[in-house]
């Protein structure tokens, strides 16, 4: 282990302690070790503490929150959420917020209220299109969804798996033309799905499920202060030293019926974590999972995951007029969906002059490439008169990669029982799993899944 360290001084430093003292100092012993402090991992840590368990939460970034991005404007003290925005009006959310002392309100999404422009997602040319009223089509869509209510609770697929769930979503839409007028709305809301019309219908159903359709009608839950980081700020306080930030598991000593032992790199040096149980709440791509000494069964499953790319940013100095917003479309594409990679949406924020740009891709892209594409999109808007020509370059106030985002497997894998095999991993080698790949890209749904399905099994 030490021989892997390129830093000779670090090695000398470690050797200067006696092995016994070092072991005592550096070993963290807990009931549960949790990997990943995003929506699912943070919730798990707080809930387990609440239930009298000792935990350690290992997060690679310097803050908790995962896909939650909150920008605090130093001048106005205004906050802008440019990652996770809304939650569901569900008991698990209200209980969690009450526990964290985060206040919330219910708001209805304002579809069309701000009169967005329809622009090509690559050329920024204005497109003569207005999305149709999706109401009737959403009812048709919900009728289809209601055939598979178990999907709201997890990847609980009927046996045999109906063909409709396996069809690429574009083919599903051809089969059910009355849903067509909801396509653009589902696409825009379910951002991050990559090649939308090619994705198996299952993934569209999971991302834009019955509960989302209902909340569009009756209202979403949002933090009163429009500062979703409050959730993770409070959780960080509650967890205190039980949260190891800027930390990564580098190797696994063992992971079996006797418990788990992990080597963890932290800002204050190498630590050993010993826990009775392991809960993994990071995207379970093979490259993320490699430090956990996977066996063939585990790596066979995780190795199947493909992923999309999703990027968020806040820009200054764009020349866009106040209150501007645009929805990207394609001039001559099916359902007018924009071609990806490309810009999804541009939205004004509560801070004057700062605009939110969301960008999507069917696959991961280098961050620098995406930044370049977004900046060049602003230049195109300036060139065609949508934005004013201003001196200087568009300035990134924030840029955040949410990649790998949606984790999917092929139709064949779904048909061959992938999710049954994936769920059968729960508890195998004293390891449990939660997070989006095990359910859906939705914090509220993940909290309920974690609370009702994963933690009770882990605690048994
Ligand atoms: C732009 C955007 C907008 C969204 N809007 C909403 C919304 O409005 N409402 C909603 O409910 N959902 C929304 N989502 C989806 C929601 O964010 C996800 O469903 C949810 O965050 C998934 O939670 P998770 O715990 O699976 O993963 P994440 O929140 O991604 O957490 C994973 C954590 O693990 C950490 N990590 C990764 N690898 C390692 C490693 N090797 N070691 C240690 N730590 C690691 C990451 O840094 C991260 O903190 C949005 C997502 C994006 C990207
Ligand atoms: C809860 O939040 C309110 C309002 O933000 C604050 O006044 C109060 O002190 C907080 N209580 C706790 C226990 O954090
Ligand atoms: C936009 O499209 C509508 C109907 O397709 C058409 O009537 C109208 O003339 C078009 N407008 C422009 C500016 O092209
Ligand atoms: C879709 O919307 C358009 C425009 O609002 C309408 O003319 C058309 O009939 C709708 N199509 C279906 C299948 O409902
Ligand atoms: C945006 O640019 C303006 C003009 O240069 C500047 O005054 C302001 O501070 C910038 N805002 C941010 C958040 O960078
Ligand atoms: C932008 O919208 C806000 C809130 O609706 C409004 O108060 C303001 O006047 C608008 N600004 C412009 C320039 O239209
Ligand atoms: C739109 O696509 C169709 C079919 O691919 C093609 O025939 C048509 O010429 C295209 N129109 C434009 C304006 O690009
Ligand atoms: C939460 O999960 C439980 C168990 O799966 C389920 O019975 C319940 O309906 C879920 N609640 C919501 C709001 O989805």
Image (spheres, rainbow, N blue to C red):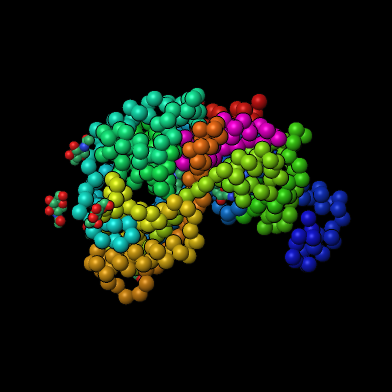
Ligand 7's quadrant is bottom left
Residue drawn 47% across the image and 41% down it: 441
Residue drawn 27% across the image and 69% down it: 383
Indicate yes or no whether the magenta region holds residue 76. no
Q: Is residue 353 above or below residue 57?
A: below
Q: Is residue 457 above or below residue 384?
A: above
Give how far across and how far down residue 331 sits, in percent: 26, 54
Give how far across and how far down residue 419 sits, in percent: 55, 33
Q: Is residue 330 above or below residue 441?
A: below
Q: Quadrant of residue 239?
A: top right
Residue drawn 68% across the image and 49% down it: 291
Residue 81 left/right relative to 261? left
Residue drawn 86% across the image and 50% down it: 20
**Which is nearer the eye, 410 or 271?**
410
Give how far across and how far down residue 399 sits, in percent: 45, 60
Q: Quadrant of the N terminus?
A: bottom right
Residue 374 left/right relative to 113? right
Total marks shown come to 0
Q: Is residue 120 visible?
A: yes
Indicate yes or no whether the magenta region holds residue 434. yes
Give how far across and how far down residue 340 sits, in percent: 38, 54
Q: Quadrant of the C terminus?
A: top right
**Which is nearer the eye, 304 or 67?**
304
In this picture, which residue range is highlighted in magenta? Answer: 420-447
In the displayed image of the protein, which residue is found farthest to the bottom? 391
Q: Is residue 229 visible?
A: no
Q: Quadrant of residue 302?
A: top right
């Amino acid at each position: 282990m030490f021989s892997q360290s390129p830093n000779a001084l670090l090695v000398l430093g470690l050797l200067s302690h006696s092995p016994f003292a070092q072991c005592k100092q550096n070993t963290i012993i807990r009931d549960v070790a949790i990997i990943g402090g995003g929506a699912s991992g943070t919730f798990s840590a707080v809930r387990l503490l609440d239930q009298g368990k000792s935990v350690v939460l290992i997060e690679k970034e310097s803050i908790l929150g995962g896909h939650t991005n909150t920008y605090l404007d130093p001048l106005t003290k205004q906050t802008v959420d440019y990652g996770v925005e809304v939650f569901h009006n569900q008991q698990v959310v209200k209980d969690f917020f009450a526990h964290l002392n985060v206040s919330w309100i219910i708001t209805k999404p304002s579809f069309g209220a701000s009169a967005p422009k329809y622009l090509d997602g690559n050329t920024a040319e204005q497109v003569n299109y207005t999305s149709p009223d999706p109401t009737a089509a959403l009812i048709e869509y919900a009728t289809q969804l209601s055939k598979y209510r178990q999907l709201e609770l997890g990847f609980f697929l009927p046996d045999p798996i109906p063909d409709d769930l396996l069809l690429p979503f574009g083919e599903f839409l051809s089969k059910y033309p009355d849903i067509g007028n909801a396509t653009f709305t589902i696409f825009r809301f379910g951002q991050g799905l990559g090649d939308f019309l090619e994705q198996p219908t299952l993934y569209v159903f999971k991302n834009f499920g019955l509960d989302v359709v209902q909340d569009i009608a009756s209202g979403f839950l949002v933090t009163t202060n429009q500062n979703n980081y409050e959730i993770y700020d409070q959780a960080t306080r509650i967890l205190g030293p039980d949260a190891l930030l800027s930390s990564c598991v580098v190797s696994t000593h063992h992971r079996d019926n006797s418990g788990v032992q992990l080597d963890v790199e932290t800002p204050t040096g190498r630590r050993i974590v010993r826990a009775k149980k392991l809960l993994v709440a990071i995207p379970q791509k093979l490259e993320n999972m490699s430090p956990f000494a996977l066996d063939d069964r585990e790596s066979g499953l995780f190795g199947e995951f493909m992923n999309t790319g999703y990027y968020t940013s806040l820009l200054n100095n764009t020349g866009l007029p106040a209150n501007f917003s645009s929805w990207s479309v394609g001039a001559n594409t099916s359902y007018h969906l924009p071609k990806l990679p490309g810009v999804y949406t541009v939205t004004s924020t509560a801070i004057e002059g700062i605009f939110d740009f969301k960008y999507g891709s069917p696959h991961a892209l280098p961050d620098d490439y995406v930044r370049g594409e977004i900046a060049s999109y602003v230049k195109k808007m300036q060139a065609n008169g949508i934005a004013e020509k201003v001196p200087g370059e568009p300035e990134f106030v924030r840029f955040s990669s949410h990649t790998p985002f949606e984790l999917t497997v092929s139709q064949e894998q779904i048909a061959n029982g992938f999710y049954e095999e994936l769920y059968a991993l729960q508890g195998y080698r004293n390891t449990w799993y939660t997070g989006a790949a095990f359910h859906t890209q939705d914090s509220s749904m993940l909290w309920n899944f974690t609370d009702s399905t994963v933690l009770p099994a882990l605690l048994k």
